[in-house]
Image: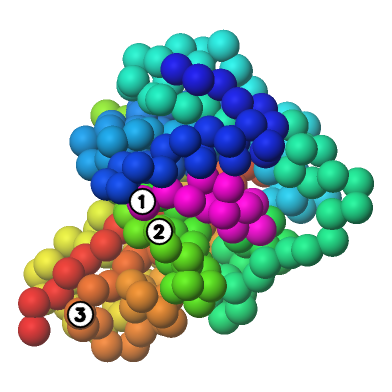
Amino acid sequence: MRIIRTTQALRTWRRRQDPPGTSIGLVPTMGALHAGHRSLMQRARRTCQTVAVSIFVNPLQFGPAEDYRRYPRNLSQDLASCREEHVDLVFLPEPDTLYPRDFQTTVAVSTLAQRWEGEHRPTHFQGVTTVVTKLLNLVRPARAFFGQKDYQQYGVIRQLVQDLDLDTRVTLCPTIRDADGLALSSRNRYVTTSQRQRALALYQALSAGKAAIGRGMRRADPVEKRMAKILDTGHGLDVEYLACCDARTLEPLARLRGTVVLLGAIRVGGVRFIDNLIVRIRQ
Ligand code: PAF
């Protein structure tokens, strides 16, 4: 497995991958790799000839009061995971490699990035789209792999790739969950047992919403009320948003039809949890 730390070495590596038919799969990460990331690497391994993983805790996507400094970092374990998944290349830049002192450009998606997560983390997606654009430009992968847990991020990146005519297919991979249903996240490492326990209500609420749609409920309002009631019942958490949306535009829906995504974000004692479930409605 090759480890590259500079953009120059990455460009040289990339030029050597050029024989026709070579497909590169990119898995962008911020490290603290878990089974969710590993499932992305496995999907890349199955579908592409060469698998590249980037590990970079991107300062641009953290708000001033957020956890950039505390964000879990565990490089030796991350590299071991990449080796076990037969990754070919790990790109491991430092912040000033990607953002040198005179860095002045940001890439921003408008409407899709402004609601839900965008309302609660106003500069977040701009940081994500800037770094992802740089990674896609450097690696020029045939495919890039993202987890469903960050469903809005996937939508924003898909929009970015479409709007900027980038030659990469953006692939959504299923959320990986613990046995109790909690979606895996690098940040789960620093939640207490009690926060974790209370946060499970989010998945339970989304699952109840999905079940209600499965039983034939076609108006968003009663589905959202049902989900909100589950989050309301004494878990000591704050709901940031909970909505039934169109899976492509992320616009809230009144009547449920087509592919719907149930999106939710909560705070439990200062820690944010997001999750979502996709429901395909047959007309
Ligand atoms: O999902 C993440 O881990 C990050 O937002 C990403 C896509 C690697 C960009 O920093």
Image quadrant in which you'd find residue 200: top left
Where is residue 271? Give x, y as percent: 62, 42
Crowd band around label 3 with a 10 angstrom C-alpha radius: few (<14), some (14–19), many (20+): few
Question: Which label belongs to residue 143?
Answer: 1
Question: Label 2 vs label 1: CA separation?
Answer: 5 Å
Q: Is there CB contact under 8 Å for labels 2 and 1?
A: yes
Give the residue pinned by disc 3: 258
Q: Earlier in the sequence, mark 1 or mark 3?
A: 1
3D distance between C-alphas at marks 3 and 2: 26 Å
Q: Residue at x 67, y 67 (%)?
A: 107
Q: Quadrant of residue 104?
A: bottom right
Q: Within 8 Å: ligand 1 and the Cβ of disc 2?
A: no
Mark 2 surroundings: few (<14), some (14-19) or many (≥20) residues within 10 A? some
Residue 140 is left or right of residue 224, and the answer is right
Determine the CA span between mark 1 and mark 3: 26 Å
Give SS at disc 2.
Answer: loop
Residue visible at 56% across and 11% down?
76
Tell me which numbered mark, 3 or 2, is placed earlier along the sequence. 2
Q: Using the image, determine if residue 98 lies above or below residue 160.
A: above
Contact between marks 3 and 2 (CB within 8 A): the answer is no
Looking at the rendering, the stretch of residues picked out in magenta corresponds to: 130-143
